[in-house]
């Protein structure tokens, strides 16, 4: 309770008010609430403004999924929001932070939305770290990281200078130009990364000293924690194939048959590696040998499509880029002129400006899509990923068999 006091004296009238402790406590609490309320209000405004700015920034980069193209052998994935590994499936999309693990003898091929494709080789751990599109500038931001193992990357032609495609490791990071074929490898135990550029070019950032090294076609570089970056080394030249030429049809009297593969010698090279498979991914090699000749003879080949790769091997063990080819083997006993070729497209899927076609034809035929060769497996099935085509396009498929018969079909497609 407040008490009013009054006292008179020579100096005049003096008046004061005595306020109780409870009153001071009450008004102090009111003042504290006002201060806290004001702080909460301005704090909330700050939070909202930061959230709105973050949202506006997020609009500049849209997440785009990554798709499996091929899966061979034991390939597992661990999604960013999961703790368990699961078997990879072609219908399962990958997003930023997802991990791919390949077992012994296994590999897979994935494709980013801009047409960049990556082959993840056996015993490899690969992470999708960026897959974004800026809708305002239409710039692409693609990146993957090798924890251990080896990947092979191909980039499409680049029209937007702000786009970037990167391949990173713990020790270094390579930014690839458009139309570049490159390979990255990391030895986790040694703490060393290697980058090979076979076509196009790349710049490699040494993360330890922040120095940038440029790699041109047929050049190689190693970066390690202990020794830093090596000197840029020249890769050996790839051999030139003589026989059979790419997509050659080989007609024999009967199968199984014998086929000879031959190539031109490369100056300064004393040995070559030859790999042959009936699968385009080479998951099961029928032949994989290093030879000192310029030809090899394969025995007991049945009718079908065969794929082979040829490497120059330098004296220090460094291999060139693979010279890849395929041939079709057929028996004259199965030759039928005028027989129509089966060619059916059962499904197509839009992936932005890229389209996936799935269908069936006959084993051993030569199939093209808009003039570009396409793979057909041993059963005649095919799944094709086109180059970026735009919103609407017409795809022309042409199948040609060893007898000269031709069948074509046109498929109108439209992006979603």
Image (spheres, rainbow, N blue to C red):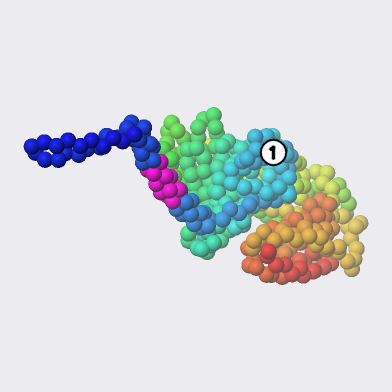
30 or 268, nearer to the observer: 30
103 or 47, nearer to the observer: 47
Q: Quadrant of the C terminus?
A: bottom right
**Residue at x 73% of width, y 53% of height:** 326
Q: Position of residue 135 (x, y in %)?
A: 54, 62
Q: Residue furthest top?
A: 189
Label 1: how many Cα within 10 Å (few below 14, some 14–19, many 20+) = some
Q: Residue furthest front?
A: 8
Query: Callout 1: helix, strand or loop?
Result: strand
Q: Is residue 316 visible?
A: yes
In the rendered image, the vertical position of residue 92 relative to residue 402, given as above or below = above
Q: Position of residue 262 (x, y in %)?
A: 69, 50
Q: Position of residue 78 (x, y in %)?
A: 65, 39
Q: Is residue 237 visible?
A: no
Magenta span of residues: 32-46
Name the dominant secondary structure of the magenta segment. Answer: helix
Q: Position of residue 257 (x, y in %)?
A: 84, 48
Magenta residue check for 33 = yes
Q: Quadrant of the N terminus?
A: top left
340 or 93, nearer to the observer: 93
Q: Residue furthest left?
A: 10
**Residue at x 86% of width, y 64% of height:** 341
Magenta residue check for 264 = no
**Residue at x 73% of width, y 45% of height:** 89
Left or right: where 335 falls relative to 191: right
Place residue 353 in its image quadrant: bottom right
- Total numbered labels: 1
**Residue at x 61% of width, y 41% of height:** 80
Give the residue at mark 1: 76
In the rendered image, the vertical position of residue 409 relative to residue 242, given as above or below = below
């Amino acid at each position: 309770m407040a008490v009013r006091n009054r006292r008179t004296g020579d100096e005049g009238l003096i008046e004061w008010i005595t306020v109780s402790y409870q009153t001071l406590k009450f008004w102090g609490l009111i003042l504290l609430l006002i201060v806290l309320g004001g702080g909460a209000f301005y704090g909330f405004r700050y939070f909202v403004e930061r959230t709105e700015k973050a949202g506006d920034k997020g609009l500049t980069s849209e997440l785009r999924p990554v798709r499996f193209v091929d899966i061979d052998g034991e390939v597992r994935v661990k999604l960013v929001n999961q703790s368990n590994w699961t078997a990879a499936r072609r219908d399962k999309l990958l997003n930023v932070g997802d991990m791919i693990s390949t077992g012994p003898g296994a590999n897979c091929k994935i494709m980013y939305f801009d047409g960049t494709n990556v082959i993840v080789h056996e015993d490899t751990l690969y992470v999708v770290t960026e897959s974004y599109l800026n809708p305002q500038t239409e710039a692409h931001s693609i990146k993957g990281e090798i924890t251990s193992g080896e990947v092979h990357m191909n980039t499409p032609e680049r029209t937007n200078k702000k786009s970037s495609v990167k391949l990173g490791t713990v020790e270094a990071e390579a930014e690839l130009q458009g139309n570049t074929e490159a390979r990255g490898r990391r030895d986790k135990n040694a703490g060393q990364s290697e980058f090979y550029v076979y076509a196009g070019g790349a710049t490699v950032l040494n993360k330890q000293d922040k120095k940038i090294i440029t790699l041109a076609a047929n050049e190689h570089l190693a970066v390690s924690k202990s020794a830093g970056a090596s000197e840029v080394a020249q890769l050996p030249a790839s051999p030139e194939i003589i026989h059979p030429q790419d997509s050659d049809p080989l007609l024999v009297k009967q199968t199984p048959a014998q086929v000879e593969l031959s190539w031109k010698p490369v100056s300064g090279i004393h040995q070559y590696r030859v790999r042959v498979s009936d699968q385009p991914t080479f998951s099961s090699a029928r032949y994989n040998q290093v030879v000192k000749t310029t030809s090899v003879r394969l025995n007991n080949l049945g009718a079908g499509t065969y794929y082979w790769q040829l490497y120059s091997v330098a004296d220090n063990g460094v291999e060139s880029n693979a010279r890849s080819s395929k041939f079709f083997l057929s028996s004259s006993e199965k030759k039928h002129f005028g027989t129509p070729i089966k060619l059916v497209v059962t499904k197509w899927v839009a992936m932005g400006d890229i389209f996936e076609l799935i269908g069936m034809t006959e084993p051993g035929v030569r199939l093209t899509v808009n003039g570009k060769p396409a793979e057909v497996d041993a059963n005649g099935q095919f799944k094709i990923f086109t180059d970026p085509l735009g919103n609407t396009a017409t795809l022309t498929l042409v199948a040609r068999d060893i007898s000269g018969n031709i069948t074509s079909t046109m498929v109108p497609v439209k992006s979603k």
